[in-house]
Image (cartoon, rainbow, N blue to C red):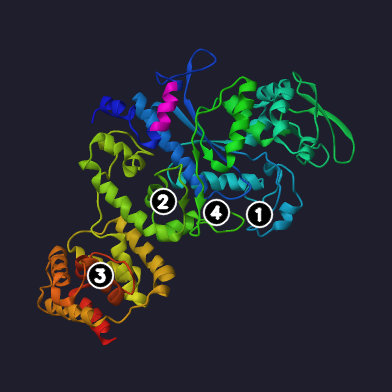
Amino acid sequence: MSMQDLIDAARVSKSWPFQEAQRLLKRYPDGTKPAKDGSTSPVLFETGYGPSGLPHIGTFQEVLRTTLVRRAFEAMIGARPEDGKTRLVAFSDDMDGLRKVPDNIDRKDVLEANLHKPLSRIPSPFSNEHESYAAHNNAMLREFLDRFGFDYDFVASSDMYNSGKFDDALRQVLRKNQDILDIMLPTLRAERAATYSPVLPISPVTGKVLQVPVEVVDAEAGMVRFTDDDGTVVEQSALGGLSKLQWKVDWAMRWYALGVDYEMYGKDLTDSGVQSGKIVQVLGGRKPEGLIYELFLDEKGEKISKSKGNGLTIEEWLTYGTEESLGFYIFPNPKSAKQLHVGVIPRAVDDYWQFRERIPEQDLDKQLGNPVWNLLRVNGGWEAEEAPGAGDSLPVSYGLLLNLASVLGTEASEANLADYLDTYLGDVERGPELDKLITAAVNYTRDYIAPTLSKRAPEANEAEALKALDAFLADASGDMSAEDLQTEVYEIGKREEFGFENLRDWFKALYQTLLGSDQGPRMGSFIKLYGIENSRKLIAEALAR
């Protein structure tokens, strides 16, 4: 694959990251972004994070999806990640006032005593390691993103406000104060409109972010006037960290000040995106391109809420699956809601490896739509030789490991599964990917499979078929291949005397009587992995019921 082949394919691809990047290419047809001084600057992608809580799967998916679009855009302009043609900013809104104390904080008293102060000016309730609550959560965000190898620049709102880097943009907000009010006031309820101001001054007495009417005294000097909570009329600067902006105005100001070209956001921020888009135009900027994605749902189809705790954490996914499988699950159809619960993990793991194995067989246009092809390039290059692992496969599926672990029951352990796999693989080494899955399979089986298993007794015709399978295994050699074992399992299910309407009924009987589940693996692979004699013991136990 040449770079020109990639450029040509990327510019017409129907894969969603490339569709998004194609809209950016219309903004910058030659792939370069002019700067104010006549030079060029990187095309800027942004993701936002609210540090009132710890980063979570929603944070991960937004950075991942934005990075996928970034890499797609680079492919279209023939740039490599190291060329510096693009930049990703992970922005932390740590000047927001703390509105309520999160439920999952132990030292709630620290936060309760500092309600409505900027997150970056509240002492950390966790330890003295960080200077503020926001600093702690910002550090967690960086650690979180680094864990997955994302390429990004971290920018904190507090640094931009306090250092004066936002001052020019804040002056523009003050100049356009009435125009912004004309946009916002019609969207607000009467009681909210009565106190609404684009600028939120910070009280010189309490340090709180105030929701009060603000009069612009001198836009060029940055001076505003307001009444503090104690009734005192205060005249002070809005610059240098002495104020922050209302959320929708703040978002627009950030787009304007940083020159953001692309930012995606969730469906719940649709209205915010509309209003902020109007405000950034008033400021003299341009609304970024971006995708509005659907939100995650729990297994009941209900919206995931941090306060309800009905979601799935990154740690939970990685306990029962892998980082790659999480990226794979998130990749498709960002405009469709996804149910996010532990039950989706096993299939995501196995589908990831199936798509990875397929890459070398696919034409380039199909590769651009392959989730794994894109994921392998999130933190690497674009040419095939720069994405090691394309075409790799695992000798056993995750589903098969889960079935083996469930059969072993209380005896299932990492060492036990590893022993079975070593026997199955012979001289082939397991490798780190399989070792990860062994650990995940033991965890998943212990927590979710073992408590639900119920092996039923076989029906009369099923018992006869099981006896036939046992007779075959009694004479089978230990080195018989999984494929040959699978063929014989098929043949037994086809025999008329056992009365199965179709092979699905036969395999369902095997799963329910031998494994205690409604679904299961290729039985030939399972018998090969578990061993012929052990498999015969399972049959004997089923017949004894």
Q: Position of residue 47 (x, y in %)?
A: 53, 37
> Judging from the image, what secondary structure is the residue with disc 3 in?
helix
Task: Kindly report the distance in space between the C-alpha atoms of the residues bearing marks 1 and 2.
Answer: 26 Å
Image position of 505 with respect to 436: above or below: below
Q: Position of residue 260 (x, y in %)?
A: 53, 28
Q: Residue furthest bottom?
A: 544
Q: Given the image, on which type of amino acid does mark 1 rest?
A: Pro
Residue count near mark 4 (Cα–Cα under 10 Å), binned few <14, some 14–19, many ≥20: some
Choose the circle earlier in sequence order: 4 or 3.
4
Q: Are marks 4 and 3 in contact (CB under 8 Å)?
A: no
Judging depth in this view, the residue of 280 and 259 nearest the camera is 280
Judging depth in this view, the residue of 135 and 455 nearest the camera is 455
Q: Given the image, on which type of amino acid does mark 2 rest?
A: Leu
Mark linked to residue 505: 3
Q: Which stretch is magenta? A: 19-26
Image quadrant in which the N terminus is located: top left
Mark linked to residue 102: 1
Mark linked to residue 326: 2
Choose the circle earlier in sequence order: 3 or 1.
1
Q: Where is mark 4, residue-wise?
A: 304
| 220 lies left or right of 349 | right
Q: Position of residue 472 (x, y in %)?
A: 12, 76
Residue at left 41%, top 21%?
Answer: 31
> Judging from the image, what secondary structure is the residue with disc 4 in?
loop
Residue at left 32%, top 79%?
Answer: 456
Q: Give the main secondary structure of the magenta stretch.
A: helix
Task: Kindly report the distance in space between the C-alpha atoms of the residues bearing marks 3 and 2.
Answer: 33 Å
Front of the two marks 4 and 2: 4
Whether residue 129 is visible, yes or no, is yes
Task: Kindly report the distance in space between the C-alpha atoms of the residues bearing marks 3 and 1.
Answer: 51 Å
